[in-house]
Image (cartoon, helix red, strand yellow):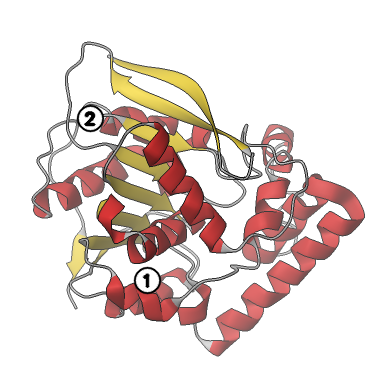
Amino acid sequence: MTGASMRTLRTPDGTSLAYRLFAAADGAGQEMPIVLLHATLSASIQLTGLARLLAARGPVLALDRRGSGASIVPMPRPLDVAVHVADVATLLDIEGITDAVLVGHSFGGVVALEVAARVPGRVRAVIAWEPPYGPLADAETRAAFAVVATATERAFASGGGAAAAAAFLDGVGGDGAWVALPTRARTFLAAQGEGAFADAALGGLEPAGLSRIAAPVRVLTGTASEPFYAPIARAVVAGIPGARLVSFEGLRHPAPITDPEPVAAAILDAIADAGITASGPAGRAAALEVHR
């Protein structure tokens, strides 16, 4: 049985961040910690299913990134990714963790990659589900990302977090994506609008730095996701020595939330293949592996 507790930390700049700790209640599973980093317009609570599967192996810390979940910031603003990198390092420090496996969904995967590039001694492996690493996209996709960022920032200025959430989702999912959601889903996502405002510009990414990553990296994609994710994933893998790409038939971008079982299996496979002892909920994932 897996227990979960809510915790908070204070960063050096005085920001209060929330995170969830998942661990086996009977003390079983004491392998290297995993840090989960959620997507934009999301929060750690949406990764609970994935976290519980992984926690049979060892402790899992799921961070609410700035502006998302319970990590409310007094003055929301677009963030340089270096801020997120520093927050992850602070989380490890507060928990007394020397190094960890980083698992990121979407922009959380971008953050995980940047942590591995900038503070390599703290990262043992990275598993990233469809990181939208904008600078490595083609010109058309980069332009589309810029339009989404501008629309999200303008919406936040005129209507706050809820408006930013709607603009971001319509930009990524197409016009009408917001109104098509059930009311309950819109209510949840509206509360994550400050996080969308913080992330949308993809600020401060350093693609040249990816070549410095020494930890094993696995990038995961789904064949049913929006078509721009796979080319970016291939570009990310091409820029990181030894990185590997795995594609999952029929899975979509929200898979870490909606389909945690195969994603957990893939994460545990990646950890085992990296030589980090792992045991827990999953056999080998059924997936098509694409090698560099």
Work out whether 123 lies above or below 28: below
Q: 53 or 68: which is nearer to us?
A: 68
Amino acid type at circle 2 is Gly
Q: 7 or 252: which is nearer to us?
A: 7
Q: Do we see residue 137 in this rendering?
A: yes
Q: 204 or 202: which is nearer to us?
A: 204
| Residue in view at x 13 percent, y 38 percent | 278
Which quarter of the figure is the N terminus placed in? top left
Is 254 left, or right, of 115 in this rendering?
right
Expressed as whole percent of the image width and height from the top left, the position of residue 145 reads: 63, 73
Question: Within the image, what quadrant is residue 129 found in?
Answer: bottom left
| Residue in view at x 56 percent, y 56 percent | 83
Expressed as whole percent of the image width and height from the top left, the position of residue 18 reads: 55, 31
Q: 172 or 12: which is nearer to us?
A: 12
Disc 2 target residue: 58
Element under disc 1: helix
Sequence order check: which comes first, mark 1 or mark 2? 2
The label on residue 157 is none
Q: Residue furthest bottom?
A: 139
Is 163 left, or right, of 89 in this rendering?
right
Q: Residues within 10 Å of mark 1 (few under 14, many from 20)?
A: many
Disc 1 target residue: 233
Q: Do we see residue 259 in this rendering?
A: no
Circles 1 and 2, Cβ within 8 Å, touching? The answer is no
Expressed as whole percent of the image width and height from the top left, the position of residue 150 reads: 76, 70
Amino acid type at circle 1 is Ala
| Residue in view at x 30 percent, y 77 percent | 211
Q: Residue furthest top?
A: 26
Expressed as whole percent of the image width and height from the top left, the position of residue 29 reads: 17, 25
| Residue in view at x 20 percent, y 63 percent | 288
Element under disc 2: loop
Is 93 left, or right, of 142 in this rendering?
left
